[in-house]
Image: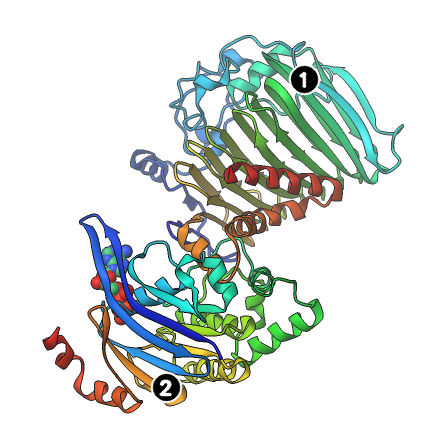
Amino acid sequence: MADSIITDRAKGAPLIAGFTEEGEDLSPLNLAASNLSPLGGDAAKEHSHGGGFGVADSSRAGRPSSFDPNDFPALTGREEDWRFTPLKRLKGLHSEALSAAAAPAIEVKVTEGNLELAVGVEQAAKSDARVGFLAPEDRVAANAFAAVETATVITVPAEADGDVIVASIHGGNDTPSAQHIVIIGEPGARATVVLDHSGLAVLSQNVEIDLKEGADLNVVTLQRWDDAAVHASDQQARIGRDAHLKHTAVSFGGDVVRVTPSARLSAQGGEAEMFGLYFADAGQHLEHRLFVDHAAPKCTSNVLYKGALQGEAAHAVWIGDVLIRKEATGTDSYEANKNLVLTDGARADSVPNLEIETGAIDGAGHSSTTGRFDDEHLFYLMARGIDEKTARRLVVRGFLNEIIQKIGVASIEEQLSEAIEAELAQTEN
Amino acid sequence: MSTLEIKDLKVGIETEQGHKEILKGVNLTINTGETHAIMGPNGSGKSTLASTIAGHPRYIVTGGEILLDGENVLEMSVDERAKAGLFLAMQYPVEIPGVTMTNFLRTAKTAIDGEAPSLRTWTKDVKGAMEKLRIDPDFAARNVNEGFSGGEKKRVEILQLELFKPKFAVLDETDSGLDVDALKIVSEGVNRAQEENDMGTLLITHYTRILRYIKPDFVHVFVDGHVAEQGGPELADRLEEEGYDRYLAKA
Ligand SMILES: Nc1ncnc2c1ncn2[C@@H]1O[C@H](COP(=O)(O)OP(=O)(O)OP(=O)(O)O)[C@@H](O)[C@H]1O
Ligand SMILES: [Mg+2]
């Protein structure tokens, strides 16, 4: 692969307590600052709701959170977590009052298994203790929280064992709207929950995922919106003791899609697998910002996002923040992002950030690669008898398949393979 | 018997400074079963000839012909040439992201043969060929050429040669970057392909060492975009002694 950047540290490589690895395009100023102030210092750690706003802070731990959008200054686009996002195309999700009524309809069905009756689906008031257990970390998410009165709460009962629950979220207008969904995995529950987004919407959405002790949820969020859709989705998961979350974000459709999944490993033995797949076409902005917060001993996280890009001004952004706190001894963590650029004019930004506050871990590493499929690749494959169309498909399918295979639900895997074929058919025209 | 004929071939490339002529009338005829070695100084156009035979789009043919049993090769697309039985082992094989060797080999074999190989014999063939070339079985699961060492890439080119069974193979400096043992292993692979399929070989090299293992019937001296002299194997030894000064002075 030409033009590739590879940063990699093998698992189990020696680590220095307090060692930080920042993304490659952090400004020298920030780098200097992060070297001066010890990470995890009091100021950085404080979960501030006020005074600390807008203060540049290189540690992910110091990011402010609040339920009130007014606690966040109006966005300028220069903020660290918004610097890649085209605010002008957000259609007011960051600046206007949002409508809960205009939000896409949610229809929940159990498609595999026999839990029709047992899966709880209800509208809960936002004052309900099950709603808002993790505060929004940016203005757009807080704006959505302010706008909703109720949340759709999907409760997977303890006896669930491999059921597939699909929430079809279908939009039909472009009014800036807000929505809140809570997914609860009761202790020991094992199930797949799919959030399947389609149609047209301008939506800021909060999804909270609560995994109780020993729960094992496979959450898949599919963004296959119409071309004009705008979607900001903050998906925060709290992972209980010995619980396992597999979270897969798949983004194909929409003008601007910004998904910010976070996994809070706050009890011993938790495991987070965070996967993602995106296919950005001409003019599309697809952004995924991960946060894995290791705050308890003996937790594991594994992040892998893969994206293909094609067409003029196709833009993909991937940020992977992994924080291993002092108390997270015995952590094993790895994150990787791989992009495949299929045509000129497409751009992939990829920034892994690994902050480690303890030396007593099993392993931590990250890698980011951006490869190009160019004429030389095509020539090589064609010189072996493979026609151009097949060559292109071979490369893209092979590249993205790794993620599709991780989903583990045959019907969804098939749908995604078809979606990739459809994306590929676009370049051929 | 098949014949690959190159007649008065003229090839150039587009550069920022305009059109640059590289091949200035190449004549060469190879029959199946024969081995032709091409030797010549750096930049004389050997790789250009190889890539032009395979159909690399960068090279623009401005005159002459390439015929495979009378068929016009220049009118064929790159994949059609491979299907017609031409194979190029590249000087610098590229790494292909996202495609495993297994998947690639099967797809290419299917394309070349026009039908999918029987799964059982195919798996066995691949395993056997890899063993003979001392390629680690793990390579099957790796992406094409990705992270392979220089020598490993060359072995994998010859692996393909053995599996795809072309009529004519052009080997562009397959011996460069190989250690002594690998040189022998790779040469044996080429000789096997030649014997089993009655393959014709065009071997581009800078060194006579490989010619100890792969015996050429003809040696061509390539200078400044054309064949300056032809002879038998003894010509290679003479080149090793004297270098190319004689030809360069003339050119
Ligand atoms: N893309 C290109 N741009 C500019 N010049 C090129 C390009 N490709 C080839 N050339 C030039 O064409 C000439 C022939 O190159 P070629 O690679 O065919 O030589 P070669 O005989 O294979 O050399 P070597 O023994 O070093 O492999 C050289 O002068 C080279 O610089
Ligand atoms: Mg060369």
Q: Which amino acid does label 1 sit on?
A: Pro
Tell me the tag on residue A393.
none
Say if residue B149 shows up in the picture: no
Depth check: give the residue in front, A323 or B136: B136
- Dot 1 corresponds to which residue? A104
Number of numbered discs visible in the structure rendering: 2
Residue at x 52% of width, y 79% of height: B134
Residue at x 48% of width, y 16% of height: A72
Depth check: give the residue in front, B14 or A41: B14
The answer to whether B136 appears left or right of A73 in the picture is right
Q: How far, Cα to Cα, is label 2 from label 1?
A: 73 Å
Locate the N terminus of chain A by quadrant: bottom left
The quadrant where residue B170 appears: bottom left
In the image, farthest residue toward the left: B249
Residue A51, how many percent across, how many down? 44, 17
Q: Which amino acid does label 2 sit on?
A: Pro
Above or below, B31 against B58 in this view is: below
For label 2, the SS is: loop
Residue at x 49% of width, y 54% of height: B97
Say if residue A106 shows up in the picture: yes
- Dot 2 corresponds to which residue? B216
